[in-house]
Image: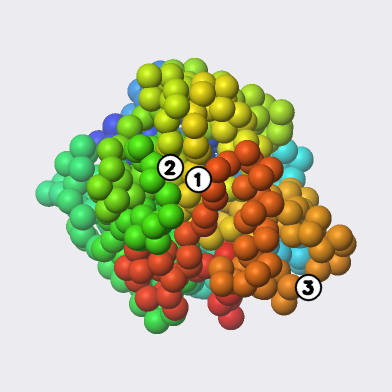
Amino acid sequence: MSGFFGCVSRNECVNEVFYGTDYHSHLGTKRAGMAFVDNGKFVRSIHSLEDGYFRNKFEGELPRFGNATMGVGVISDCESQPITITSHLGRYAVATVARIDNIEELTQELLEERHHFAELSDSKINASELVAILIGLGKNIQDGINIVHSKIKGSCSMLILTDHAIYAARDKFGRTPIIIGKNDKGYVCASESSSFDNLGYEYMRDLGPGEVVQITADGVRQITPPQKRMQICSFLWVYYGYPSAWYEGVNVEESRYRCGAAMARRDNDIDPDFAAGIPDSGVGHAVGYANEKGIPYKRPFVKYTPTWPRSFMPQNQKMRDLVAKMKLLPNRQFTRDQKIVFMDDSIVRGTQLKDNVVKLLDEGVKEIHMRIACPPLIFPCRFLNFSTSRSTYDLYARRVIRDMEGTDNISDATFMEYANPDSQKHKEMVDIMCRHLQLTTLKFQRLDDLVEAIGLPKESLCTHCWDNSSYDE
């Protein structure tokens, strides 16, 4: 997904940006970067995170950023950033949380207008550089941001560091968050509110969808008001968000408790010995399930984190599978002859879950009941990167549906039949998954229960991955 952090202060802010950015490390492990302005001079550094952690990569470089009082940092699951650029608007650095669905079309348009691209990410056009160039087409920064929002299909939230301020611009439909914090020395803006507390900043407010503000040490000035329509990504509460984070006034961990409780209330046909979560994001859901069901919560799996990174990040499928297999260690004290109900956040490709279940069967578990905290992922995401398929049928649910239908040529209407939790096709699909994954039972969260657990109106949430609904006009 990616996440960013910016700070403008009356005092030196290098440490704030360093630690604030680090608190976004759960949002990506591919690239990271920071950019600062020190006495009008821009200083930037970018490192790969595929062979190390953010703090280890950047800690030794902190002195070179001087006594900067303005800076931005970003953890990216795709391109190298922040991008620094010089245009008729002056020098500025851009950090984005974005997925540009029409990047090829926009690239060709800019090339025909004789613009050029200097940055590449894995031999592809760097999306953040494209955004930076589009900003430079404007009469001023505000106009440039409007151009980005009008041209991009997908989503784009951004921080723009200039020599006098940071501009924070939330995606036009608010698909990803930007939260403002403050203390007596200045202001911060971030993807995660949980990055504020230990740095001594208090929550000020969320930016609205499409809202743009200019941030200086003296205050936050709105330059573009928010629009009314919001489509914030529901996966922030299901998976992406850190447990202590808040979005739109809704705490992530509390939402997961409610989500697990909703599944427990629908589970009247099993009698598990205890509930457990697939670490880490399944834990909150499992605690909510156990509390509602009145059964113990235990940890038959523990995660070994010192050397094994997040499993979905490596681009090589064999490496993803290896990481998933090696990082979770079973605890046989809680497995032998036990009936366990597990909560996991989602099933994306299915391989990791199957490997972990086989591991439990080898440890002598009597029954394995799997509860998934969201509906089946059937429609690849058009706005972020979580459920975006590398091939048409990379998503587990779509592969099962293809095999059931016996063809690759399946209409959206047919997919919607499988998405309906009350349909016979949905039941048959889940039964096939259950057998394939060697589970005793398998159930997915209903979308209406998930929306209620989040606590925002359905029309304010993006639920495209599950029901093909979207709003991007």
Q: How is the image coloured?
A: rainbow
Mark 2: which amino acid? Val
Left or right: residue 122 compared with residue 247: right
Q: Are marks 3 and 1 in contact (CB under 8 Å)?
A: no
Mark 3: which amino acid? Ser
Q: Which of the two discs, 3 and 1, labels the residue nearer the N terminus? A: 1
- The vertical placement of 304 against 76, above or below, is above
Q: Position of residue 200 (x, y in %)?
A: 17, 41
Q: Are marks 2 and 1 in contact (CB under 8 Å)?
A: yes
Q: Secondary structure at mark 2?
A: strand
Q: Position of residue 81 (x, y in %)?
A: 55, 42
Q: Looking at the image, which residue is at 47% across and 49% down?
A: 371
How crowded pointer 1 is (Cα within 10 Å; few <14, some 14-19, many 20+) is rated as many
Q: CA distance from mark 2 to mark 1?
A: 6 Å
- The vertical placement of 168 against 318, above or below, is below
Residue 411, which numbered label? 3
Q: Looking at the image, which residue is at 65% across and 49% down?
A: 433
Q: Secondary structure at mark 1?
A: strand
Left or right: residue 295 compared with residue 108: left
| Location of mark 1 (residue) | 370
Q: Is residue 392 visible?
A: no
Q: Quadrant of the C terminus?
A: bottom right
Q: Secondary structure at mark 3?
A: loop
How crowded pointer 3 is (Cα within 10 Å; few <14, some 14-19, many 20+) is rated as few
